[in-house]
Amino acid sequence: MSEAMIGVVGGSGLYGMEGLAVREERIVETPFGAPSDPYLLGELDGRPVAFLARHGRGHRIMPSELNFRANIYGFKKVGVERLLSVSAVGSMQPRYEPTQVVVPDQFFDRTRHRADTFFGQGLVVHVSLADPICPQLIDVLCAAGERAGAAIHKGGTYLCMEGPQFSTRAESRIYRQWGVDVIGMTNLQEAKLAREAEICYATLAMVTDYDCWHHSEDDVSVEAVIATLNANAATGQAIVREAVAALADLPRECGCGRALESALITAPEAIPAATRARLSLLVGRYLESPPVGEDLP
């Protein structure tokens, strides 16, 4: 089987992928430590896919404990160019009801304790995050959602909170004043790191609750979230299946695969040898490229 080109990261309630014919459970070593779980490499309706359970099978890892760098680097290492994320979120707007799906196109960061770049240690890189989600994947996921019969909403802002606690009522009300659409605990770092790894990234934000702002709905709780997860997992898998089929022969026409072209700031001769070696998978082709002014291969 060829190396996987489409990756799927499953969030709360999605620890496997129905229909995935697993050929190998691969333990991937990275310069950033161990990913959340072995990668399940196989075929989904005959198309190569790599699946990773974000929180580990059995849901062992809290959002703040996730090794985001290892997870995304691992996808890069097995050959993924496009990454579809499935995540449980709370709705911050009445129009997004539990069991519905939002495909956000923006993020707002309220995290505090997380590593969210591959770079440093002598190599400075500034990628653009003005549009943090791949526009091509947004269109594919929304069309896939419609074919799967899901109630799906295109666009919106995902506020990424630290967790693991849910919001206070004051926080929830303020976030609504800011105009955010959904709230979750995991996707911002994935989006940042996928951009640095030149991987297309998009999120299926599966609504489970109304956080704690809604005056006529119960406050979010683990019981309420779990009650909705099974239905959401089935919807998410159906959408992913449709999206994988659509992406199989669709050329990449976005700029995600060239995100580092003008983002490396450090002079090549100033980059420490150890850093070059550690990050060669990500930046090797740029450090070996012709001088500025000549075309990249």
Image (cartoon, rainbow, N blue to C red):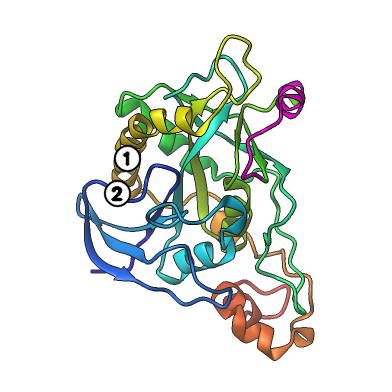
Q: Quadrant of the C terminus?
A: bottom right
The Cα–Cα distance between marks 1 and 2, rounded to whole angstroms, is: 7 Å
Instruction: Answer above or below: position of 145 versus 5.
Output: above
Q: Is residue 22 magenta?
A: no
Question: Residue 10: x percent and y percent?
Answer: 41, 48
Disc number for residue 287: none
Per the image, the residue denoted by label 2 is: 17
Point 56% across, 57% down: residue: 194
Question: Is 13 placed left or right of 189 in the picture?
Answer: left
Q: Residues within 10 Å of mark 2 (few under 14, many from 20)?
A: many
Question: Is 143 placed left or right of 275 in the picture?
Answer: left
What element does badge 1 sit on? helix
Amino acid type of the residue that numbered disc 2 sits on in the rendered structure: Met
Instruction: Answer above or below: position of 110 versus 113.
Output: above
Question: Is 274 placed left or right of 205 in the picture?
Answer: right
Q: Is residue 166 magenta?
A: yes
Per the image, the residue denoted by label 1 is: 237
Amino acid type of the residue that numbered disc 1 sits on in the rendered structure: Gln
Q: In this orientation, which residue lies closer to the viewer: 100 or 2?
A: 100
Whether residue 255 is visible to the viewer of this picture, yes or no, is: no
Question: Residue 220: x percent and y percent?
Answer: 56, 27
Q: Magenta-highlighted stretch: main secondary structure?
A: helix
Point 64% across, 44% down: residue: 163
Q: Quadrant of residue 294?
A: bottom right
Q: In this orientation, which residue lies closer to the viewer: 65 or 131?
A: 65
Q: Quadrant of the N terminus?
A: bottom left
The magenta segment? 163-177
